[in-house]
Image: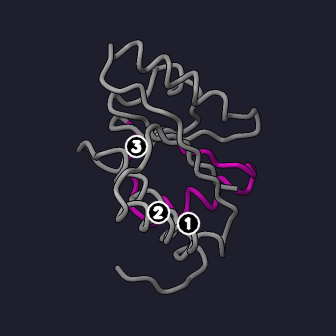
Amino acid sequence: MLKIIAVGNIKENYLKEAIQEYQKRLQKYSNIELIEVKDEGLVDKEKALFLEAEKIKKHLSPKDYIITLEIEGKMLTSEEFAHKLNNLFIDNSNLTFIIGGSYGLSSTIKDLAKMHLSFSPMTFPHQLFRVLLLEQLYRAYKINNNESYHK
């Protein structure tokens, strides 16, 4: 089971369509749940991080292997990511990815993670990042199943 918890709502139709397309493709390989929690907007940073963390925690269970997406995390190639996912599923039935909002993620959420993952030292819009994560998850399944996919 893949679970993605993301702060904020998708507003743009083209991003909604891309997310739906990758969710559809991923269903062949795994159950996937996408959970959106409301962002707190551009209020006080610490207050926003705290409130968003509380909302995220409501969707976590003790059986979740938590992976946070953050700039400070470890960068992997697509092949390394695929191999890591394959190994994680040996001992874990639920992989939970957490994408923060405008201010990132609270340290309380980062502390719950067993893996801190970064796609780049660049900052991406959190709405667009969902598409990037879903695409890389799909690519990982294709790699792990020795199926062709564009490079």
Q: Position of residue 71 (x, y in %)?
A: 33, 38
Q: Amino acid at mark 1?
A: Gln
125 up-or-down from 100: above or below = below
Q: Give the SS element for disc 3.
A: strand
Instruction: Residue 74: give its label.
Output: 3
Q: Position of residue 49 (x, y in %)?
A: 43, 20
Q: Amino acid at mark 3?
A: Lys
The quadrant of the picture occupied by the N terminus is: bottom right
Q: Position of residue 11 (x, y in %)?
A: 37, 51
In this rendering, the count of numbered labels is 3
The quadrant of the picture occupied by the C terminus is: bottom left
Cα–Cα span, label 1 and label 2: 6 Å
Residue bearing mark 1: 23
- In front here: 80 or 112? 112
Residue bearing mark 2: 19
For the residues labelled 1 and 2, say whether their Cβ atoms are less than 8 Å apart. yes
Cα–Cα span, label 3 and label 2: 24 Å
Q: Earlier in the sequence, mark 3 or mark 2?
A: 2
Q: Nearer the viewer, mark 3 or mark 2?
A: 2
19 up-or-down from 7: above or below = below
Residue at left 66%, top 75%?
28
Highlighted magenta segment, given as a residue range: 73-97
Per the image, is 62 magenta? no
Q: Position of residue 136 (x, y in %)?
A: 45, 63
- In front here: 26 or 11? 11
36 up-or-down from 29: above or below = above
Residue at left 46%, top 37%?
7
Q: Amino acid at mark 2?
A: Ile
Dot 2: few (<14), some (14–19), or many (≥20) neighbours within 10 Å? many
User: Which residue is at the far bottom?
Assistant: 148
Instruction: Residue 78: give its label.
Output: none
